[in-house]
């Protein structure tokens, strides 16, 4: 049968794994693949292929890299190379990193963008988007910018990256995985390819890479491991050491010692609580609790259901602020719920977060965690990381605020309490042994 369709061939012949991916895609796609897999080639060629099959008027696509330099360096030449088969019909706008192909009265537009300047994209519609190296992009790039732009024209997306810890890329990958498990017809698709799956590089090159790279780097970049201790993870070294020294293990509740609690309180956000006991020079974290959207009465009810006898409760420094509505401070509201004796609810001093982190690091070698009951808290602590500054390409000193912050903040308040309050507490008629040579204000 005669067809009026014209075949245009771009200089790209998919490798077997790329081909398999092209054939598997759905509307929302998350691809985790090792370095040099051919991610960028794959994603740009898919974008072009879909564009010229798109029956809608003036299709428009965006390729988004973490920063402008990367977009230009990594994708611009490839895009130009792929599109130059259109000869006079294609126009390249070097400064905007934009290519327009005009065929008859239809215009196909391809724009390279950077996640550094997301607002530049607001208001546009997109038929499809590629978020390359998404592990280095802020989550909002997807949730606030790209996702709404896809709505008008039922647009699609491909997230493609190597992992970088359990950040937004991991979240979207995990989400896609669950969607696929729950519903075989889900509009989400995900895939993960390690170098052992693809064997794209020769054996000798892989062996050489293993020699040249840190073990963690190889696991992250070539084995697509999301759980590698990263340079930007704040407590990775301390947690790894605790693992090595067997301090993350079965840590039973000692019924002869009361349990104290360190809180991070979130009213709209999560509330996190570490349960701890002092055992000589050791600090035993025996449990962890986290909840979202509950008020104090419900939280205290939950805490009373645990089989522990409580001693002290430590609340964050802002607990003294009076709440609108009740006129009571959080401290007073908490005291009124009688979880512990009056006077045993203590508000910890305000300490700069960076100083607090130093305090935690300083005493981390005394910490023991119950592996099972503290699993969630520890998992969150592993994810606690510094904020990335995409403009400078470095990690800031300040921690990033995300879902791991609550576990980390409550532990920080524990550390402040340890230095500032615990020295005066008597337990079994014995003054606790604490370091006294440390001035937190000098950190
Ligand atoms: N289908 C293909 N045919 C021929 N060469 C390819 C193909 N796909 C990728 N390549 C080659 O492999 C190299 C890596 O491709 P690409 O840049 O797309 O990989 P990547 O996974 O994005 O890498 P990185 O992790 O470094 O960003 C490119 O230099 C390209 O020349
Ligand atoms: Mg790439």
Image: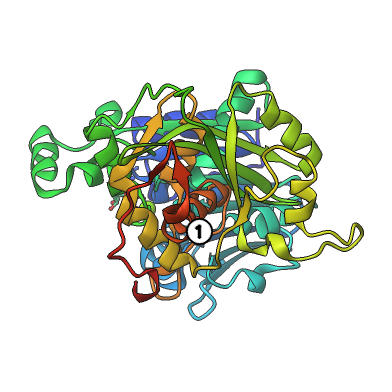
Asked which quadrant contains residue 260, the reply is: top right
What residue did someone put label 1 on? 137
Does 48 sit above or below residue 180? Answer: below
Q: How many tags in the picture?
A: 1
- Quarter of the image containing the C terminus? bottom left
Q: What residue sits 75% from the left and 51% below the top?
A: 267
* Nearer to us in this view, 89 or 302: 302
> Where residue 15 sits: x, y (%)?
34, 35
> Where residue 379 sits: x, y (%)?
46, 37
Q: What residue sits 42% from the left and 21% below the top?
A: 252
Can residue 230 be seen by looking at this rendering? no
- How many residues crowd mark 1 within 10 Å: few (<14), some (14–19), many (20+)? many
Q: Residue 37 vs residue 65: left or right?
A: left
Does 318 sit above or below residue 425? Answer: below
* Nearer to us in this view, 134 or 197: 134
* Nearer to us in this view, 52 or 87: 52
Is the residue marked 1 within 8 Å of ligand 2, measured from its CB?
A: no
> Where residue 95 sits: x, y (%)?
50, 81
- The type of colouring in the image is rainbow
Q: Residue 66 vs residue 188: left or right?
A: left
* Nearer to us in this view, 6 or 35: 35
Dot 1: element? loop
- Quarter of the image containing the N terminus? top right
Q: What residue sits 22% from the left and 34% below the top?
A: 244
Q: Residue 162 vs residue 21: left or right?
A: left
> Where residue 183 sits: x, y (%)?
67, 20
Q: Residue extending furthest front?
A: 429
Does 413 sit above or below residue 248? Answer: below
Q: Residue extending furthest bottom?
A: 95
Q: What residue sits 60% from the left and 21% below the top?
A: 307
Q: Residue 437 vs residue 393: left or right?
A: left
Can residue 224 be seen by looking at this rendering? yes
């Amino acid at each position: 049968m005669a067809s009026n369709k014209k075949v245009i061939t771009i200089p790209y012949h998919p490798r077997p794994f790329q081909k398999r991916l092209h054939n598997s895609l759905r509307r929302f796609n998350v691809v985790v693949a090792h370095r040099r897999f051919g991610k960028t080639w794959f994603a740009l060629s898919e974008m072009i292929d879909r564009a010229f099959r798109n029956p809608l008027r003036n299709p428009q696509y965006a390729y988004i890299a973490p920063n402008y330099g990367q977009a230009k360096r990594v994708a611009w030449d490839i895009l130009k190379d792929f599109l130059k088969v259109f000869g006079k019909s294609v126009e390249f706008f070097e400064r905007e990193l934009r290519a327009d192909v005009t065929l008859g009265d239809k215009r196909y537009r391809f724009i390279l963008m950077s996640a550094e300047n997301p607002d530049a994209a607001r208001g546009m519609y997109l038929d499809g988007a590629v978020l390359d190296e998404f592990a280095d992009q802020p989550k909002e790039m997807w949730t606030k910018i790209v996702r709404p732009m896809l709505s008008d024209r039922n647009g699609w997306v491909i997230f493609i990256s190597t992992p970088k810890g359990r950040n937004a890329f991991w979240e979207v990958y995990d989400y896609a995985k669950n969607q696929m498990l729950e519903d075989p017809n889900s509009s989400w698709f995900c895939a993960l390819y390690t170098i052992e799956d693809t064997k794209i590089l020769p054996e000798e090159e892989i062996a050489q890479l293993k020699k040249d790279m840190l073990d963690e780097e190889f696991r992250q970049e070539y084995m697509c491991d999301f759980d590698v201790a990263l340079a930007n993870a704040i407590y990775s070294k301390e947690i790894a050491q605790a693992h090595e020294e067997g301090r993350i293990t079965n840590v039973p509740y000692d019924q002869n010692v009361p349990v104290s609690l360190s809180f991070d309180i979130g009213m709209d956000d999560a509330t996190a609580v570490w349960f701890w006991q002092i055992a000589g020079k050791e600090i035993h974290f025996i449990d962890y609790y986290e909840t979202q959207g509950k008020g104090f009465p419900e939280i205290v009810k939950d805490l009373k259901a645990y089989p522990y006898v409580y001693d002290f409760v430590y609340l964050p420094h802002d607990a003294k602020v009076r709440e609108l509505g009740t006129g009571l401070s959080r401290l007073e509201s908490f005291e009124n719920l009688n979880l512990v004796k009056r006077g045993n609810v203590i508000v910890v001093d305000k300490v700069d977060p960076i100083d607090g982190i130093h305090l935690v690091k300083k005493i981390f070698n005394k910490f023991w965690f119950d592996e099972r009951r503290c699993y969630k808290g520890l998992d969150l602590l592993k994810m606690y990381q510094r904020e990335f500054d995409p403009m400078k390409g470095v990690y800031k000193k300040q921690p990033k605020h995300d879902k791991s912050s609550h576990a980390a903040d409550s532990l920080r308040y524990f550390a402040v309490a340890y230095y500032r309050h615990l020295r005066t507490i008597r337990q079994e008629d014995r003054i606790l042994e604490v370091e006294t040579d440390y001035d937190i204000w000098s950190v």
